[in-house]
Image: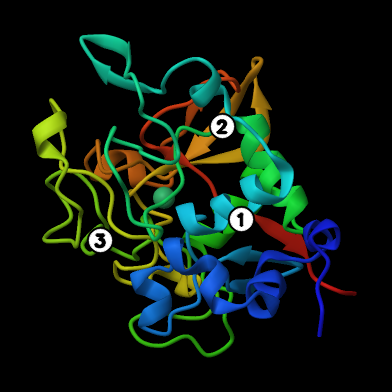
């Protein structure tokens, strides 16, 4: 089978990944994929499906290769972290989130709302709405979920009744976070996408790791959900909502995609 480069953007990410020779993606081949986990895989949640993991750098790299996008953080010299106020970090971009080489299985960050939306469109998907993201994160929609999850039940955290197992700051127990403490004033860093404990609906990292853009406006800003490695469990709670200007590119804001299920 031949796959013309120009046609690749028409394929959903998973299909494209399946069709591409393994060697072409070897630079960004992820630990998760080596372990057999499908980082682009989706979970049905009622009338839509949502990515099981945050979009990893390896997948964002395929999007950039296909479209030639230079992100805002790249054009403007770096993305942001919060230290004593918002601080621009030279060279911190989706390629090198902390200014140094990163693994392809780290969540893609330093991505604006518009760039996240463009990625999902390229992948044949879209960003979830806030309502969809909330349903997926907190209400178990699988017919026969594994224990301790119960079909139809809603939970306070994306991990269930308690925040344990997420990659948050201090409140969530031991997690497989990558250690970037040498360049941070707070927190340890993200865990590889999909490497923490699976939560409600079998989804990874809806709680913490990186905040996730959703396609819902509040007062000219876009909602971000779920908290991050920079925060404790409170920001993972169903009752917590944050917003950000859509053109911000930040070290702990990433995203995942959704799509409608066939009727
Ligand atoms: Ca997350």
Q: Earlier in the sequence, mark 2 or mark 1?
A: 1
Image point 46% across, 46% down: which residue? 108
Look at discs 2 and 1 and give the one toward the viewer.
1
Look at discs 3 and 1 and give the one toward the viewer.
1
Specify the quadrant that holds the C terminus. Answer: bottom right
Circle 2 Cα neighbour tier, 10 Å, few/some/many (<14 / 14–19 / ≥20)? many
Q: Quadrant of residue 191?
A: bottom left
Q: Secondary structure at mark 1?
A: helix
Q: Which residue is denoted by mark 3 in the rendering?
A: 162
Q: Earlier in the sequence, mark 3 or mark 1?
A: 1
Cβ atoms under marks 2 and 3 closer than 8 Å = no
Q: Which mark is residue 134?
A: none
Q: Which residue is denoted by mark 2 in the rendering?
A: 223
Specify the quadrant that holds the N terminus. Answer: bottom right
Question: From mark 3 to mark 1, how far is it between C-alphas?
Answer: 36 Å
| 70 up-or-down from 16: above or below | above
Please name whichever residue, 28 or 148, is drawn nearer the observer in this view of the structure: 28
- Residue 42 visible somewhere in the drawing: yes
In x, y percent, where is residue 69? 66, 35
Circle 3 Cα neighbour tier, 10 Å, few/some/many (<14 / 14–19 / ≥20)? some
| 78 up-or-down from 199: above or below | above
Please name whichever residue, 85 or 36, is drawn nearer the observer in this view of the structure: 36
Q: Which residue is denoted by mark 1 in the rendering?
A: 62
| 101 up-or-down from 219: above or below | below
Image point 41% across, 51% down: which residue? 107
Q: Secondary structure at mark 3?
A: loop
| 250 up-or-down from 229: above or below | above
Question: From mark 2 to mark 3, how far is it between C-alphas?
Answer: 23 Å
Circle 1 Cα neighbour tier, 10 Å, few/some/many (<14 / 14–19 / ≥20)? many
In x, y percent, where is residue 235? 33, 39
């Amino acid at each position: 089978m031949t796959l013309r480069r120009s046609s690749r953007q028409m394929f959903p990410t998973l299909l494209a990944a399946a069709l591409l020779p393994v060697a072409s993606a070897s630079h960004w081949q992820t630990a998760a994929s080596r372990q057999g986990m499908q980082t682009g895989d989706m979970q049905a949640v009622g009338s839509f499906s949502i990515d099981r993991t945050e979009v990893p750098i390896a997948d964002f790299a395929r999007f950039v290769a296909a479209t030639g996008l230079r992100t805002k953080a790249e054009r403007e010299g770096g993305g942001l972290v919060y230290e004593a106020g918002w601080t621009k970090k030279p060279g911190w971009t989706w390629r090198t989130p902390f200014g140094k080489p990163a693994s392809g299985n780290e969540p893609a960050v330093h991505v604006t709302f518009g760039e996240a939306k463009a990625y999902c469109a390229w992948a044949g998907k879209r960003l979830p709405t806030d309502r969809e993201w909330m349903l997926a994160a907190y209400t178990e929609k699988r017919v026969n979920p594994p224990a301790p999850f119960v079909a139809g039940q809603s939970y306070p955290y994306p991990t269930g009744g308690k925040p344990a197992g997420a990659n948050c700051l201090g409140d969530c127990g031991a997690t497989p976070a990558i250690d970037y403490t040498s360049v941070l004033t707070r927190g340890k860093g993200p865990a590889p996408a999909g490497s923490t404990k699976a939560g409600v609906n079998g989804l990874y990292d809806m709680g913490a790791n990186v905040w996730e853009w959703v396609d819902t406006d509040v007062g000219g800003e876009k909602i971000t959900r779920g908290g991050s490695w920079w925060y404790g469990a409170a920001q993972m709670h169903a009752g917590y909502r944050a917003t950000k200007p859509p053109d911000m590119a930040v070290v702990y804001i990433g995203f995942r995609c959704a799509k409608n299920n066939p009727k």
